[in-house]
Image (cartoon, grey):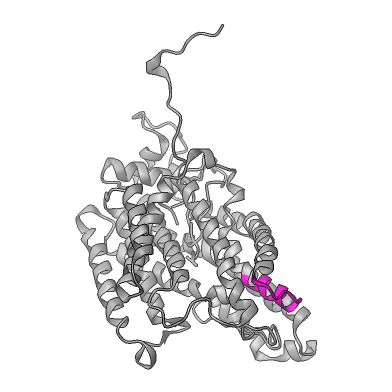
Amino acid sequence: MGERVPRAERTPPERFAPPSHGFAWLRMIGALVVIYGHSYPLVSGNDMFPPEWPVQPDHGLLMGFFAMSGFQITGSWVGDPHPARFAAKRVLRLWPPMLSVSLFVALVLGPLVTTLPLADYFATRESWGYVVGNTGMVTLRHHLPGVFANNPWDGSVNGSLWTLPMELIAYGGLWLLLLVGAARRRSRWLAVLALVVLVVVDRRMAHAPGPESAGSLLSVPVEPLLSFLVAFAIGVVLRLYPIPRSPLAATAGLLALASMPMSEATAFWMTLSVSYAVIVFGHHWPARARVPGVWVNGSYGVYVWAFPIQQTLVLAGVGNQWVLLALAAPIAYGVGTLSWKFVEEPTMRLRHYIAPRRAPSTVPTDGRPVGEAGAALVGATDHRDAREAGSATMAGEGPPTEPIGTLPMVPVEGAEERTAPALPRVPTIDDSDSESGAPEPPDSSVKDG
């Protein structure tokens, strides 16, 4: 018989998975729900919800992506407050999947399904403008000549991409905010001020619908942009301040949302309740629901690839929304996982070339865990900051789409730049980057989302 372990030495079982795992799960679930949300419009040509409704449930889903992204990316800055490295990480997370899907759609899928002769297809400026505009990310193009032109949904090739410029704008605003010191304890009020300003402007815009609307910024409609920026800023504030993360309060907020009448007040409450809820539930994901990271890290790929997959199935004759969902969801999941393995993970490995050079020792002399010691080195100002920055930076970073830690450890990286296989926090996909849509941002996105 084995020796009995003294009661004082027993380790209680974990109740919750690391936040990175919870956020990755939420992002993947959200990306798959987006496929459901697009299924009816793509087979009917009609909006799923009346556009005059103040409350658009699909926008609520995207707000969750943006809130996770703001939370995670702020954590990335706390772990490594270097402006150039911060910007480079955002590019490495958000841009490669966007480039790969745009090139594939324009140069492979488009020629296969276009109604034009191939010579005419490649001779048009619209074909090459699609690649240039979409890889630039702020001047999106949604149509290719003769591609899906006879589908019910107006020939749009990849309608999901519309949130990614918003994600990029959110990153730029946060970069400026953090550059002036908003992550420092004495200056965190700047983040609250930014949130208040966004809320005020967003509420004013809500009273100017229709022809008096604010139009668009480049390829981004201003009213949705402001709403999503409010959610993003809520995520930033929740990361910078020790606001209690109560599952009971989050659930009560969502139940109150479900019971409220259709109104502008309800639309605003949706932003608040959904943003808070995704942060809370990401931190309270059941430990028993843990899976290998590769199963849930592909949410960004699912998000950017699903729409052209669905349009191709509709072109092939699928005319029922449930059949479309049943076929598109597993295909998009598989393609998203391949995107993670062969596009996102390899490009994210490039981060170690820009990681700060520090001593390679993995055992701090003060006896603290590696993550906490690393966070202290970059200026974490209290115990909570040190703990969260350490676990978050170990998790990798991203937009409406940040992944669970799977990157290899390299000698030149400090502890806070590593991505450990023990699945710490995705804040993209709790304190790192996404990936929106959306969504890190993505880790998170709906969107680095």
Query: Does residue 7 lie above or below 225 as drawn?
Result: above
The answer to whether residue 39 is magenta is no
Q: Is residue 70 visible?
A: yes
**Which residue is the extreme one toward the top?**
1
Q: Is residue 87 left or right of residue 143?
A: left
The quarter of the picture where the N terminus appears is: top right
Residue segment shown in magenta: 307-321
Rendered location of residue 396, percent (x, y):
49, 50
**Which corner quadrant of the image does residue 39 belong to?**
bottom right
**Relative to the observer, which residue lies in front, 248 or 394?**
248
**Relative to the observer, which residue lies in front, 137 or 310?**
310
Query: Does residue 275 lie above or below 311 as drawn?
Result: above
Rendered location of residue 330, percent (x, y):
68, 59
Q: Is residue 262 left or right of residue 326?
A: left
**Which corner quadrant of the image does residue 53 belong to?**
bottom left
Q: Is residue 291 left or right of residue 446?
A: right
